[in-house]
Amino acid sequence: MFSCELMSKYLYFKTAKFESNQDFANWLHQELCRAGEVAGVPINDEFMFVIPVTRGTGKGEIYLGKNEEQSNPPLWQVWFENKVGFFKKLFLKPSTDNEQHYKNLLFRLVGSIDGVSNVEWSDI
């Protein structure tokens, strides 16, 4: 399985598979559920969609949407963020297990899209 760098936050890729952020969110939600993940209904957050996820006692959110850069096929981005309480963040080193799990899963799911290209992690 692909192991990604924890420092690289955003997964970018190009595909013509999706017509809108909603299409991408619905597809990703379906794929997450198919993979056995506990994923909430996609939420429209104006410029992107958010999918809440739970794994064990860890909670997080997957953000996704079409990038503003004009390209053919379109450029999309997706990333995971842990939901960690303020005091846990302040006094404890939060586990990176969930982050690594979801980053690997996102990379695998995005890589399975027919005709996908330019799949890469970036900090920007």
Image (spheres, grey):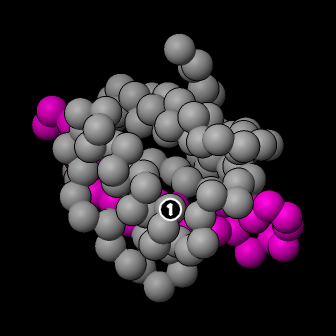
When asked about the image quadrant of residue 17, the answer is bottom right
Q: Which residue is mark 1?
A: 24
Left or right, 62 with respect to 19, comes to left
- Which residue of the protein is positioned furthest toward the bottom in this rendering? 46
Choose between 91 and 22: the one closer to the eye. 22
Q: Considering only vertical position in the picture, is 94 above or below 79? A: above
Q: Is residue 69 magenta?
A: yes
Residue at image position (69%, 68%) is 67
Residue at image position (74%, 75%) is 68
Left or right, 76 with respect to 101, comes to right
Percent coordinates x, y for residue 104 in the rendering:
49, 29
Q: Which residues are magenta?
A: 50-76
Choose between 9 and 17: the one closer to the eye. 17
Left or right, 109 with respect to 71, comes to left
Residue at image position (52%, 51%) is 79
Q: Mark 1, residues whose alpha carbon is within 10 Å: few (<14), some, or many (≥20)?
A: many
Left or right, 6 with respect to 58, comes to right
Residue at image position (20%, 44%) is 38
Magenta highlight: main SS: strand
- Which residue of the protein is positioned furthest toward the top in this rendering? 1
Q: Check disc 1 and give the amino acid type.
A: Phe
Percent coordinates x, y for residue 83 in the rendering:
29, 52
Q: Is residue 36 magenta?
A: no
Percent coordinates x, y for residue 11 in the rendering:
63, 46
When asked about the image quadrant of residue 56, the answer is top left
Location of the C terminus by quadrant is bottom right
